[in-house]
Image (spheres, rainbow, N blue to C red):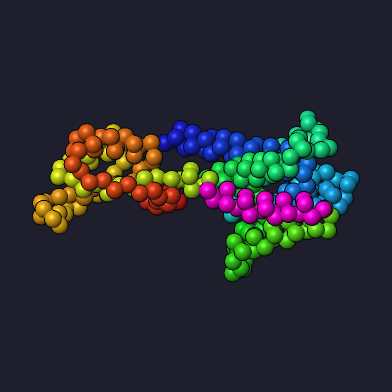
Amino acid sequence: MKNQSVKSIAKQYFLITISTLILAVGTYFFKFPNNFTFGGVTGLSVVIGKALPIISPSTANLILNVLLLAVGFFFLGKNFGIMTVYASMLLSFSLSGLEILYPMDKPLTDDPMLELVFAVLLPAFGSALLFNIGASSGGTDIVAMILKKYTSVDIGRALLLSDLLITLSAFLLFDIKTVLFSMLGLFAKSLVVDSVIENINMCKYFNVVCSNPEPICGYIVDKLKRSATICEAKGAFSHDQKYIVFTAMKRYQAVQLRQFIKHVEPGAFILISNTSEIIGKGFNNGG
C-alpha cells in the first residue's frame, strides 16, 4: 500500500513537471516575445515588462508568484496546496532559466497568428493537465482560493474579470493589433482548456440489451476490471425476457467490449454514449 502511494505521488509530480514545462515553453517562446497579455499573472508580467523595461516578463512573473505564494500561505495556511506551490515555483524558475539559456528580443516567426496559436495551445494544454490532477500553476488561482475561503464572490466570474482587465490593460502600452490578438487569445484559451480536460476525461457509457448478460458481465469484471449493473426488462414488441447491462469505462476498453459483445451475442442492442464526468468507485471525480 505504501509503495502504491509513493508510486501515485511520483506519477502526480511527474505529470505536474511535464505540464508546467509545456506551459513555460509556450509562455516564453510565443507569449512573451509577442506581448500577448492574456492569462493572469503571465499576462500581467508582460504588461510590467513593458512598463518597466528594467524588469523582464520572466523576472516579473517570478516576483509576482513569490508574492502571491506568500499571501496564499498567510491567508490559507495548511490548506494551501503543495502541488500548486511546486508548479508555481517550477514555472517561475523555468521561465527565468529559459531567459538565460535562450535570450529573445523578437518573436520566433514573422506570423503573429501562428505565434498566437502556439501561445494559446501550449499553455492551455499544460494548464488543463494541471487542473485535471487537482493542481494549478498558481498566479490568480491563489487569489481564487482566498476569495473562495473568505467571501461569497462567484470565483469563475472574478477570475474572468481579472484576466479581462489584465488583457485590456494592453491598450495603454501596445498597439491595437497586439490588443486584439490578446483578446482573441483570452477567449481561445478558455475554450481549449475546457476541450482538453473533457477529452482527457472522456469515457464511454454502455446500455446493452441482451438475452444472456453473464458472459458480458464476466468479461467486464474479469478482463476489463470494471463493474456493471444488470436490470431485467421486457421487449415492447416481442415481449421476450431481456436484460439491460449498464457500465462505464475508458475509451480503449469500450472498443474491446463492443467487439466482445458482437462476438458472443450478435443480436444484442447496444447504446454507447460519451461522458466526461463520472463520479463513483473506480473513477476520479469528473472522469
Q: What type of secondary structure mainly makes up the magenta span?
A: helix
Q: Is residue 113 visible?
A: yes
Check residue 9 for magenta coloring.
no
Placement of 106 over or under 161, stated as above or below: above
Identify which residue is drawn at 65% across, 45% down. 120
Which residue appears farthest toward the right when viewing the image?
A: 54
Residue 38 is situated, as x and y percent measured from the top left of the image, at 70, 52
Identify which residue is drawn at 77% across, 51% down. 178
209 to the left or right of 130? left
Residue 196 is situated, as x and y percent measured from the top left of the image, at 53, 45
Placement of 122 over or under 70, stated as above or below: above
The part of the image, by quadrant, that contains residue 114 is top right
The part of the image, by quadrant, that contains residue 107 is top right
Q: Which residues are magenta?
A: 175-195
Check residue 186 for magenta coloring.
yes
Identify which residue is drawn at 39% across, 48% down. 274
In front here: 197 or 12? Answer: 197
The part of the image, by quadrant, that contains residue 251 is top left
